[in-house]
């Protein structure tokens, strides 16, 4: 009985079967299109979730977080997929998807989303970000306790939009922290969170992840250089950074002048 119901149910709801009973002639193409779109959306979400879990695992494997103390999200259309709170990333599977609308309403899954959800949603609402990586990387977090801005010690500063600012401290998971982070991100794709960690965003999970890795590397570089008795280290000037920014804009375009 159960099996039979299971088979007939989609037909009754007009799903999967474009020519389901009860559809008027004019609705058939529309229903078929809707089904195809629904399948595409589900596939896109499943792929994005798989990439999100892989990225979250990478943050642990590469030592950017310990345990579950970071979080990753990716936007697929109007849905934001995020890592759940308190579940080790190596235990996450395809059935653990957590998805929310930009208003914070949960639309997919039953696990609770990361406690930093307000931070992620605020960034998606205010920027064109498609993916966000938040970590507690040790060198970056150390720098967040020392300065208001990471001094421009390397030209990769330009790849993040300019000298990376430190957002003032606020309790994790609060709208106050989200507000501080948004201000620190103005014109940048990365910022530090004082006594807390990093946040970067990008067009893809790989890009957001790579920006986090670059930021952590630059923080380590600055700490190493400032710890030397031969210091203080030389820094790049705004003009030098502007030149790199112009070069980066042409990066990957061999025909550009
Ligand atoms: Zn955090």
Image (cartoon, rainbow, N blue to C red):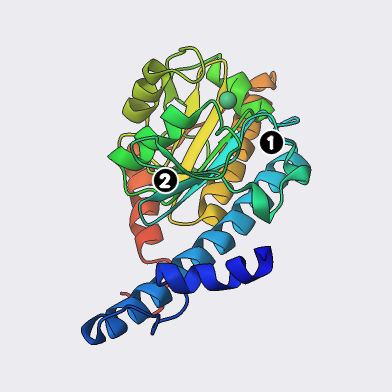
Given residues 37 and 21, the one toward you in this image is 21
Quadrant of the snapshot with the C terminus: bottom left
* Point 38% across, 85% down: residue: 19
> Could you give the CA–CA distance between mark 2 and mark 1, rounded to whole angstroms?
22 Å
* Picture coordinates of residue 95, whole percent (x, y): 66, 52
Which dot marks residue 64?
1
Q: 132 or 165, which lies in front?
A: 132
Point out the frontmost of discs 2 and 1.
Answer: 1
Mark 2 or 1 closer to N-term?
A: 1
Q: Are marks 2 and 1 in contact (CB under 8 Å)?
A: no
Q: Name the spot of residue 152 as percent of width and height, x first.
A: 47, 34
Residue on which the image places disc 2:
158
Q: Position of residue 174 (x, y in %)?
A: 43, 17
Residue 163 visible (yes or no): yes
Question: Which type of secondary structure does the marked residue at label 1 adopt?
Answer: loop
Does residue 169 sit above or below 40 in this rendering? above
Residue 148: quarter of image: top left
Q: Specify whether tag 1 is near ligand 1 (CB below 8 Å).
A: no
Q: Is residue 40 visible to the viewer in this orientation of the structure? A: no
Q: Nearer the viewer, residue 129 or 50?
A: 50
Q: Quadrant of the N terminus?
A: bottom right
Kindly identify the residue that appears in the image at 39 percent across and 24 percent down.
Answer: 178
């Amino acid at each position: 009985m159960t099996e039979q119901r299971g088979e007939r149910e989609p037909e009754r709801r007009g799903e999967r079967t474009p020519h389901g009973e009860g559809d008027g002639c004019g609705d058939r193409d529309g229903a078929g299109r809707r089904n195809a779109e629904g399948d595409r959306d589900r596939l896109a979400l499943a792929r994005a979730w798989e990439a999100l879990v892989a990225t979250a695992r990478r943050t642990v494997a590469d030592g950017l977080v310990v345990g579950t103390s970071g979080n990753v999200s990716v936007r697929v259309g109007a849905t934001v997929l995020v890592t759940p709170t308190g579940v080790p990333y190596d235990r996450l599977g395809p059935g653990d998807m957590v998805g929310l609308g930009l208003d914070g309403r949960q639309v997919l899954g039953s696990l609770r989303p990361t406690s930093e959800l307000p931070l992620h949603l605020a960034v998606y609402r205010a920027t064109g970000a498609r993916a966000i990586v938040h970590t507690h990387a040790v060198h970056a977090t150390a720098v967040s306790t020392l300065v208001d801005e990471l001094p421009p010690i390397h030209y990769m500063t330009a790849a993040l939009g300019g000298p990376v600012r430190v957002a003032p401290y606020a309790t994790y998971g609060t709208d106050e922290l989200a507000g501080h982070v948004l201000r620190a991100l103005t014109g940048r794709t990365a910022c530090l969170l004082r006594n807390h960690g990093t946040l970067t965003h990008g067009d893809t999970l790989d890009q957001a992840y790579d920006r986090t890795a670059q930021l952590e590397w630059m923080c380590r570089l600055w700490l190493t250089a400032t710890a030397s008795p031969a210091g203080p280290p030389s820094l790049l000037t705004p003009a030098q950074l502007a030149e790199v920014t112009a070069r980066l804009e042409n990066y990957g375009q061999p025909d550009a002048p």
